[in-house]
Image (cartoon, rainbow, N blue to C red):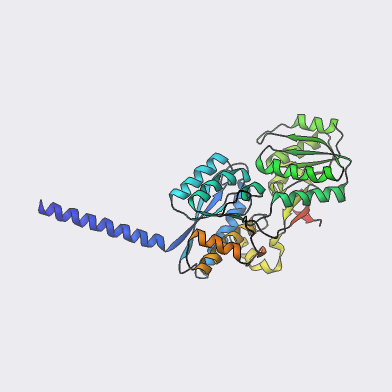
Amino acid sequence: MKNNKKTLLSLTASMLLAGGMGMAQAADTIKIALAGPVTGPVAQYGDMQFTGAKMAIEQINKAGGVNGKQLEAMVFDDACDPKQAVAVANRIANQRVRFVVGHLCSSSTQPASDVYEDEGILMITAASTSPEITSRGYKMIFRTIGLDSLQGPTAGKYIVEKIKPKKMAVVHDKQQYGEGIARAVKDVVEKAGINVAVFEGVTSGDKDFSALIAKLKRENVEFVYYGGYHPELGLILRQSAEKGLKVPFMGPEGVGNKDISAIAGEASEGLLVTLPKSFDQDPANAKLVEAIKAKGDDASGPFVFPAYSAVQVMADSMKMVKNEDPEEVAEVLRRNVFATPTGQLTFDGKGDLKDFSFVVYKWHADGTKTALD
């Protein structure tokens, strides 16, 4: 019995020691969850976000880390599905990760952000543009990209001043992001006296848009704005060309993906797209672009640099407060100016950037783009 007691005490001590070592090891890293679509129809956008965030983590770690600790990336797949995003947010909270870069789709970001706010987790999205995400008085939610309330008017102004259609259509995918930006565009053009003859939603995942195209032809629209993502618009463009609907199309950053050219082919030529500035073309970012390319990644995606900046401002804020308390980091984010690859960033009380601009581009069938303003 005595030997058994000694063995039990020894095992208990070993377990406690191992547990203590595990805690010490865990304390040596600062975990940052990268949440977004690894799978699903818009996984390409998730790749952009992960590329930028991982590069920031790598470079910060090489420079000595944060407060003597290394940053550790933890990737979570929400497939841009709201229910899965909530499940991911709860997993992140249960694993006691206190910082998140994500999510990507606004319809996923909004419900996930409820969890983060409740749990005191700091979240910065580099891609979600719906104004509703930051309109609820939350203290732990930020973004390093502009809002649809800015992007929509940018598109609407271009339509009014450059396209000048007498009759147009506004189509959306019935989702928070797509419908939200479509309504913002509709408001701008209607105030300028343009007749929106068709305002209609399609279902995300649909493949046949014959009925929509027939309606657009019947209404003799001269221009079509689409709010949503590239899988649906790519098919609409291709099928429109096949059915003889020859009018210009325009969409938001959710369609500005090289895969739209793969889907639509030549029908994607001339598509108008609003996107963040091409940060990869800034000479100041040349070394960063080289580092991204050296890993075989594409630096040109619209969410690559905003994701890099999201990690950087988190890290810079942790250094300023000399700890990793999310609430203290959030307060520092609101009070300071941060020099990043996407410019000098300052946040307002809601967690939105005080200054961000979208640019209108002409898309080409080979997947390249040309700035128009």
User: On the picture, is 253 further left or further right than 15?
Assistant: right
Above/below status of 286 relative to 200: below
Q: Position of residue 84 (x, y in %)?
A: 53, 41
**As rendered, which of 296 and 355 lies closer to the eye?**
355
Instruction: State whether residue 364 appears in this view.
Output: no
**As rendered, which of 138 and 372 lies closer to the eye?**
138
**As rendered, which of 308 and 131 lies closer to the eye?**
131
Q: Position of residue 312 (x, y in %)?
A: 58, 63
User: On the picture, is 68 further left or further right than 268?
Assistant: left
User: On the picture, is 345 further left or further right than 323?
Assistant: right
Q: How many dots with numbers?
A: 0
Instruction: State whether residue 167 appears in this view.
Output: yes
Q: Position of residue 219 (x, y in %)?
A: 85, 32
**As rendered, which of 248 and 95 lies closer to the eye?**
95
Where residue 281 sits, quadrant-wise, is bottom right
Quadrant, the C terminus: bottom right
Q: Position of residue 309 (x, y in %)?
A: 61, 61
